[in-house]
């Protein structure tokens, strides 16, 4: 027999997840890392299949200088939502913060393979490649993007940066 508390938990779970996630993100944004950790850990327990809480938890652990926990949380987020653009952006930000630029490139490349008609993915990949001073690879990515999005101001700007870097 299911207890009343269990029944209430089942019905309250999605709402409490959202409340916990919002509270955790608000705490993270104000750099209240202890509160962020507490709220986000509770959110991952309320619904362990929601990748956005794992991404935020990875960023929180990173800021708390807990690299192993941060890496575990990032890997969990990636496994839960490999094609979700919001998760990809969050993970790219996280991996960029920890200095794993090759992982950032791999994320954007995978995203492009899944959704080749997303202009932002071409720009984000090119931008990371430019930061790494891989101008030829960036230019090749930009050229592919420009073939699909010939009026993209951001891709044109990135092309200029890549060409300047190649001179």
Image: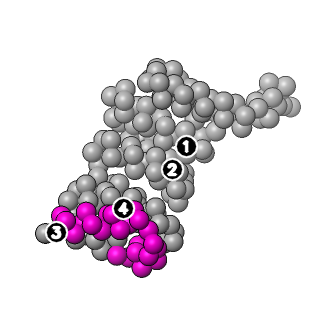
The numbered mark, 2 or 4, whose residue comes first in the sequence reads 2
| Structural distance between the alpha carbons of marks 3 and 2 | 32 Å
Give coordinates of residue 29: x percent, y percent. Answer: 48, 29
Residue visible at 45% across and 40% down in the picture:
73
Image position of 54 (left or right of 69): right
Viewer-nearest of labels 1 and 3?
Answer: 3
Q: Secondary structure at mark 3?
A: helix
| Structural distance between the alpha carbons of marks 2 and 4 | 15 Å
Mark 3: few/some/many CA within 10 Å (<14, 14-19, 20+):
few
| Structural distance between the alpha carbons of marks 4 and 3 | 17 Å
The numbered disc on residue 166 is 3
The residue indicated by pointer 2 is 87
The numbered mark, 3 or 2, whose residue comes first in the sequence reads 2
Give coordinates of residue 130: x percent, y percent. Answer: 26, 59
The numbered mark, 1 or 4, whose residue comes first in the sequence reads 1
Magenta residues span 143-166
The residue indicated by pointer 1 is 52
The residue indicated by pointer 4 is 125
Mark 4: few/some/many CA within 10 Å (<14, 14-19, 20+):
many
Give coordinates of residue 47: x percent, y percent. Answer: 64, 39
């Amino acid at each position: 027999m299911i207890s009343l508390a269990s029944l209430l938990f089942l019905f309250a779970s999605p709402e409490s997840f959202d409340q916990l996630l919002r509270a955790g993100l608000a705490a993270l944004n104000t750099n209240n890392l202890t509160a962020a950790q507490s709220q986000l850990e509770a959110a991952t327990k309320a619904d362990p299949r929601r990748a956005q809480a794992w991404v935020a938890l990875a960023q929180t652990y990173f800021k708390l200088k807990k690299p192993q926990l941060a890496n575990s949380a990032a890997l969990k987020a990636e496994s839960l939502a490999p094609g979700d653009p919001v998760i990809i952006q969050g993970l790219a930000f996280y991996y960029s913060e920890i200095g794993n630029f090759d992982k950032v490139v791999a994320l954007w490349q995978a995203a492009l393979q899944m959704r080749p008609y997303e202009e932002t993915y071409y720009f984000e990949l090119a931008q990371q490649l430019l930061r790494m001073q891989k101008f030829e690879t960036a230019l090749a990515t930009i050229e592919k993007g420009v073939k699909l999005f010939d009026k993209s101001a951001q891709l044109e700007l990135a092309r200029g940066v890549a060409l300047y870097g190649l001179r």
